[in-house]
Image (spheres, grey):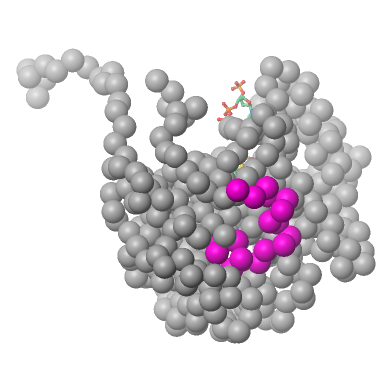
């Protein structure tokens, strides 16, 4: 029995292959490097959904981009201010719950649109600003940045968010994708599966890490303080957010895809990011600190570390980082849910009873 289901195979998938020994991620037959920075949101959705819906021709990137634009308008009209009290991830959960349920491409597009529109609205609510309506003719990333920030997105900023969403679009049977597949296996519908995925993503051991990564960078403050801060945190037995992974025993390849997106973003602005310089120093300090503290277990940087730096550079508040992750991972949740419906059975594992023996007299 392994309560973490380590190494337990419960599905065949055509969607992504995570090679934890080689540090490689393949998305439906293409290396991550070949996709990140080249596809926009509609492009990676079309790529991962190509086998998921009938007829597939309706799911091409241009058609998807148009449908996403229309769906953002519909999702915006559905937003309810009362959903936005409380933590951001709860607002997304409530907004998703208002979306129609079903198994079709229209529902999948609606879910992606709802997450982006609600995340942008959260950004504005957080600053006490009124919500900004979507522009259905804009790209999904550009429109999300514009709705959140109130000004048109620069091409470099939109490209960076597209690269981020491509990078996190799918990643094997991580906790949230597995949760989505379990719910899909009951034939509950894509919206219910997405709400399950979102709920699993909330936790700090999965999608909740990038906000705390930024807190850590703030607490360290300057590169020369990194070694001491990391050593103290490890001596207190703390986990360093943005490091370690269940599957990767080497560097998470998504970290480098995000570093490249960051380099392009800061190259377009013409100035080197001091936050990126600090992050690189902290990464170096953390890797040597972790190697010394846990010599038996290789702990390297994961996707969340440079996610934090990238989303911060795009001007998003750290309270929204998990929401932005969900905006990208919805592509994978939907694709896996559809795959589970097409090829899988009802998920129903077994447990070993370790409670007291039955004794009628105790009742
Ligand atoms: N910092 C310090 N120690 C760590 C870290 C870390 N980031 N990660 C693991 N360890 C230690 C654990 O304390 C444990 O030590 P022990 O055996 O002495 O108790 C050992 O390494 C093994 O840890 P596990 O929890 O068994 O490893 P698991 O594969 O379950 O954990 C996880 C993976 C949850 C990602 C873990 O590395 C972690 O908590 N990282 C920090 C949070 C984080 O960055 N999460 C985002 C992951 S990426 C994603 O989900 C999108």
Indicate yes or no whether the magenta region holds residue 107.
no
Snapshot quadrant of residue 37: bottom right
Q: Residue furthest left?
A: 361
Locate residue 203, reporting x and y percent: 52, 45
Locate residue 143, reporting x and y percent: 63, 77
Instruction: Please provide the residue range marked out in magenta.
Output: 29-46
Indicate yes or no whether the magenta region holds residue 30.
yes
Q: Quadrant of ligand 1?
A: top right
Looking at the image, residue 328 lies above or below residue 357: below
Snapshot quadrant of residue 262: bottom right
Locate residue 268, reporting x and y percent: 87, 68
Foreground residue among 154 and 21: 21
Locate residue 356, reporting x and y percent: 22, 17
Looking at the image, residue 78 lies above or below residue 187: below
Foreground residue among 80 and 249: 249
Quick check: can you spot residue 215?
no
Q: How many marks?
A: 0
Residue at image point 81% right, 46% down: 279
Q: Is residue 352 left or right of residue 112?
A: left
Looking at the image, residue 361 lies above or below residue 75: above
Foreground residue among 358 and 105: 105
Residue at image point 80% right, 39% down: 283
Q: Is residue 1 left or right of residue 305?
A: left
Residue at image point 55% right, 63% down: 45
Q: Is residue 321 left or right of residue 60?
A: right
Q: Is residue 277 left or right of residue 241?
A: right
Q: Quadrant of the C terminus?
A: top left
Quick check: can you spot residue 241?
yes
Q: Quadrant of the N terminus?
A: top left
Residue at image point 64% right, 76% down: 139
Looking at the image, residue 129 lies above or below residue 275: below
């Amino acid at each position: 029995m392994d309560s973490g289901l380590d190494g337990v195979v419960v599905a065949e998938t055509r969607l992504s292959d995570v090679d934890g020994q080689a540090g490689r991620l393949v998305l439906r037959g293409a290396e991550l490097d070949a996709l990140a920075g080249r596809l926009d949101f509609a492009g990676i959705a079309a790529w991962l959904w190509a086998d998921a819906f009938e007829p597939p021709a309706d799911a091409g990137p241009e058609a998807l981009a148009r449908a996403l634009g229309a769906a953002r308008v519909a999702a915006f009209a559905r937003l309810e201010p009362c959903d936005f009290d409380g933590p951001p991830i709860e607002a997304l959960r409530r907004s998703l719950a208002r979306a129609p349920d079903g198994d079709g491409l229209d529902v999948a597009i609606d879910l992606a649109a709802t997450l982006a529109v609600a995340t942008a609205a959260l950004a504005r609510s957080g600053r006490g600003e009124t919500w900004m309506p979507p522009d259905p003719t804009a790209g999904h990333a550009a429109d999300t940045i514009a709705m959140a920030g109130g000004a048109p997105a620069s091409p470099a900023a939109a490209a960076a968010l597209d690269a981020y969403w491509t990078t996190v679009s799918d990643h094997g049977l991580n906790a949230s994708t597995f949760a989505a597949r379990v719910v899909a296996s009951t034939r509950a519908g894509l919206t219910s599966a997405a709400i399950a995925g979102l709920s699993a993503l909330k936790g700090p051991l999965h999608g909740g890490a990038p906000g705390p990564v930024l807190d850590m960078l703030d607490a360290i403050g300057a590169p020369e303080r990194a070694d001491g801060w990391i050593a103290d945190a490890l001596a207190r037995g703390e986990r360093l957010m943005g490091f370690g992974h269940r599957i990767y025993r080497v560097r998470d390849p998504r970290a480098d895809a995000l570093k490249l997106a960051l380099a392009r973003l800061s190259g377009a602005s013409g100035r080197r990011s001091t936050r990126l310089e600090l992050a690189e120093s902290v990464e170096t300090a953390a890797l040597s600190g972790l190697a010394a503290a846990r010599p038996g277990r290789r702990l390297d940087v994961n996707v969340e570390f440079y996610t934090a730096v990238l989303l911060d550079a795009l001007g998003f508040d750290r309270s929204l980082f998990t929401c932005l992750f969900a905006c990208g991972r919805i592509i994978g949740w939907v694709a896996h849910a559809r795959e589970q419906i097409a090829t899988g059975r009802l998920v129903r594992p077994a447990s070993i009873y370790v409670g007291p023996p039955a004794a009628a007299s105790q009742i």
